[in-house]
Image: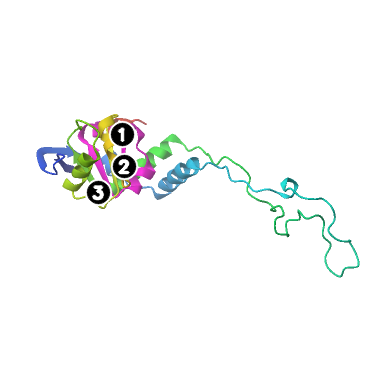
Amino acid sequence: MELEVYNISGQKTAKKAKLNKNIFGVEPNDHAIYLDVKQHMANKRQGTHKTKERGEVKGSTRKIKRQKGTGTARFGDIKNPIFRGGGRTFGPEPRDYFFKLNKKLKKVARKSALSYKAKEKSIIILEDFTFDAPKTKSFVELISNLELNDKKVLLVLSGIDKNVYLSSRNLGKTKVIKASDINTYDILNANNLLIAESSLAEIEKIHSVN
């Protein structure tokens, strides 16, 4: 598959970029995508949730009424879970949600996500560029020139470009990452992928190795 290469003014250039069919044209594996996105979301969880159980609630341990002869159920102390202000039964405890996945499966998931974007024609190849200084206005103009104003956009660069990154940081619907940091969740979460021309080779290098 060949795509036109655009400049930051939104104009087509004379160049064309060829997408590797072994990365952008594979048969998508939905289950691999599901597992990779699940791992990404799980590994972001802090796992600091906590409620107090009966033994951790502050309160008297005195029996609040006699055990028999009241005609109602027996009760212990005021920290009983059925009372308001009492401890919680089987409440959440701090835990780690992290789990690992096979590297080959993650690679299959990323290729599947990229293939979906290629199939949807949601990939735009950009000429390599940079900004003279960090300026949000410059990035907004870039997005506007490509007619992506109301879309979630993921810009993939070959390396760190501080000016481009800082220019996009204040925009809620845009994200800038390196080709080496690309992941399934970010690909699928974006409506459109902007891939810098030089980062295509980097993507192919990472995903062609078994």
Residue 193 in magenta? yes
Mark 1, secondary structure of its residue:
helix
Image quadrant in which the C terminus is located: top left
> In the image, which residues are magenta?
176-202
Amino acid found under the numbered disc labelled 2: Asn
Residue 177 in magenta? yes
Task: Report the label total.
Answer: 3
Q: Residue furthest bottom?
A: 71
Label at residue 170:
2
Location of residue 203 in the rendering, given as x and y in whole percent from the top left corner: 29, 34
User: Which sits earlier in the primary sequence, circle 1 or circle 3?
Assistant: 3
Amino acid found under the numbered disc labelled 1: Ala
Location of residue 163 in the rendering, given as x and y in whole percent from the top left corner: 26, 32
Residue 146 in sight from this viewpoint: no
Q: Residues within 10 Å of mark 3 (few under 14, many from 20)?
A: some
Distance from the alpha carbon under mark 1 to that under mark 2: 21 Å
Q: Is residue 4 left or right of residue 106?
A: left
Badges 1 and 2: C-beta atoms under 8 Å apart?
no
What residue would you read off at disc 3? Answer: 122
Q: Residues within 10 Å of mark 1 (few under 14, many from 20)?
A: many
Q: Residue furthest left?
A: 14
Image quadrant in which the N terminus is located: top left
What residue would you read off at disc 1? Answer: 179
User: Which sits earlier in the primary sequence, circle 1 or circle 2?
Assistant: 2
